[in-house]
Amino acid sequence: MKKKLILPEVIFEFQLDENICTTLLEDVSKLEWTPNQHNFYSKNSLNKDPTYDFLHEWFHECLQAVKNDLQMQCEELNVVLSWATKTENGQFHNSHTHRNSVVSGILYLQDNMSHTWFSRAHMWGKGHNLSLFPNDETEMQHEEETSKGKLLIFPSMLPHRVSCNSDDDARYTIAFNAFPSGQLGDYSCLNSLHLKKMT
């Protein structure tokens, strides 16, 4: 018997200078926080704060690289919401997706043993309600290490979670949602749409 891997998917990785991450970590750790279900998120959105304009300019460059690589039929991908997260020792973040968004990103501000886990339905366990597989084998999962300066860009509807933080230090990240703008689609296929840039 031979097994064949078919229909592989990709997410995108970029790297931010570690010195910039150190400065960002100092700034983010001083933010006001709002309790989430199992961790914390920043009280205010970062894309509205001029302090982080330089960072969002870099996010924009990365998003355009993703758009171009995927040959997406839109003029731009723009950040519409960004926030910081804080996960303290013993905390985690349950599996979730990002609504009102097409593309999302996570920037890790320091190394941490608490990793991000991406998942999607296993095609052999999808499309029926028969109990043919153990519960933990109905999804394919990918573990992504938390390393300083790493930016991941992925589809907003891709489920992901954060494992329990076993480090003494809190885990800090900056996340964002992005949406297409400008001319979308192709008029020759009668699916053209113009969206103003959202902020």
Image: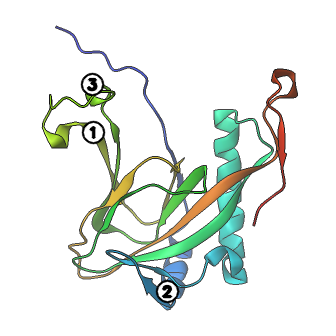
Q: Please provide percent x and percent y for residue 40.
A: 40, 80
Q: Is mark 2 on a helix, strand or loop?
A: helix
Q: Which residue is drawn at 49% across and 92% down?
A: 30
Q: Which quadrant does the N terminus fall into?
A: top left
The residue type indicated by label 1 comes to Glu
**Mark 3 or mark 2: which comes first in sequence?**
2
173 to 50, vertically: above or below:
above
**Mark 1 or mark 2: which comes first in sequence?**
2
Could you tell whether 108 is left or right of 124 in the image?
A: right
**Mark 1 or mark 3: which comes first in sequence?**
3
Q: Please provide percent x and percent y for residue 49.
A: 69, 82
79 to 193, vertically: above or below:
below
Can you identify the residue that label 3 sits on? 124
Can you identify the residue that label 1 sits on? 139
Number of callouts: 3
Can you identify the residue that label 2 sits on? 26
* Of the pair 115 and 137, the residue shown nearer to us: 137
The alpha-carbon separation of the residues under discs 1 and 3 comes to 9 Å
The residue type indicated by label 2 comes to Glu
* Residue lying furthest front: 129
Could you tell whether 83 is left or right of 148 in the image?
A: right
Q: What element carries label 3?
A: helix
Q: Please provide percent x and percent y for residue 147.
A: 39, 62
Q: For the residues carrying marks 1 and 2, which lies nearer the camera in this image?
A: 1
